[in-house]
Image (spheres, rainbow, N blue to C red):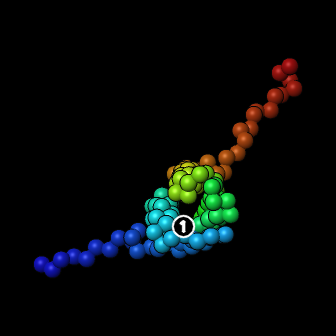
Amino acid sequence: MPPRLVLDLREVQSVQINISTRHGHLSDASQDKITNKAEKLARIFDRITSIRVTIDLSDQDKPCVDIGVSAEHKREFVASDRSNNLMSSVDSAVHKLEQQLRKYKEKVQERHRHPEARHQTMPVEPEAEADDV
């Protein structure tokens, strides 16, 4: 019997990652590390379409990292961080985005589990009759 080909669609879906730098230049090794960290966000929420990483090196002692994530059917997710080390700033900003994405994903899943929760109505209290007073 010939081997069966199994295709996992989660691996096929690609996310566009754009890394830009202001007031300086990043090495290819640093760009690869940042790309790998940003790719982890797509594992949390599979509807991510693009990730933009902007690194501001105007202050060499405290680089600023801004990360923006675009997802289907949702506004932008944004996180930024400034610390003494570039990679710790990236880690912190990615962690903030992970929290935002998990919270949003949980919210969406909860809506799908309980569709009646979207259309809640206020309970109507029975009218008090004037004759009972």
Q: Secondary structure at mark 1?
A: strand
Residue at image point 61% right, 48% down: 117
Report the residue that reaches farthest toward the bottom: 2
| Front-lying residue, 28 or 38 | 28
Residue at image point 15% right, 80% down: 2
Q: Position of residue 65 (x, y in %)?
A: 62, 60
Report the residue that reaches farthest toward the front: 61
Is residue 68 visible in the rendered structure shown here? no
Q: Which residue is mark 1?
A: 48
Q: Where on the picture, by quarter, is residue 13?
A: bottom left
Instruction: Describe residue 78's horizontal placement relative to residue 35 as left or right.
Output: right
Instruction: Describe residue 44's horizontal placement relative to residue 71 as left or right.
Output: left
Tell me the quarter of the image containing the N terminus: bottom left
> What type is the residue that disc 1 sits on?
Ile
Tell me the quarter of the image containing the C terminus: top right
Q: Where on the picture, by quarter, is residue 101?
A: bottom right
Q: Position of residue 16 (x, y in %)?
A: 53, 74
Q: Position of residue 45 (x, y in %)?
A: 50, 60
| Front-lying residue, 60 or 128 | 60
Q: Position of residue 33 (x, y in %)?
A: 46, 64
Residue at image point 61% right, 51% down: 83
Report the residue that reaches farthest toward the top: 133
